[in-house]
Image (spheres, grey):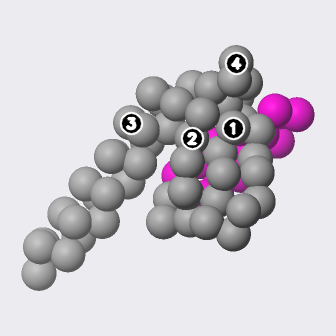
Amino acid sequence: MVELTAINGARFFLNPDLIYRVEETPDTVITLTTEKVILVQESAEQINHLIIAYRRKVFAQLFKH
């Protein structure tokens, strides 16, 4: 899960597997595979880095054993 900040300042965790698309319009808009739309404060680039870090952590745990 990646931690994000909603446009209203509330922090929440999102499963990156649910992300269909991330756009900057100029607000950052995340469209989920369920077609739900979420506005967040992080930039698309920040979200990309968070997802990469999350995936590295998951894969590191898989190959640790």
Q: Residue furthest right?
A: 8
- Label for residue 22? 2
Q: Which residue position is annotated with label 4?
A: 26
Q: Position of residue 11 (x, y in %)?
A: 74, 44
Q: Position of residue 37 (x, y in %)?
A: 76, 51
Q: Residue at x 69, y 38 (%)?
A: 29
Give whichever of discs 2 and 1 has the lower sequence position: 2
Tell me whether the residue at label 2 lies in contact with that at label 1, contact meaning CB atoms closer than 8 angstroms: yes
Give whichever of discs 3 and 2 has the lower sequence position: 2
Please provide the residue range marked out in magenta: 1-15
Q: Position of residue 30 (x, y in %)?
A: 65, 45
SS under mark 1: strand
- Label for residue 29? 1
SS under mark 3: helix
Tell me whether the residue at label 4 lies in contact with that at label 2, contact meaning CB atoms closer than 8 angstroms: no
- Label for residue 49? 3
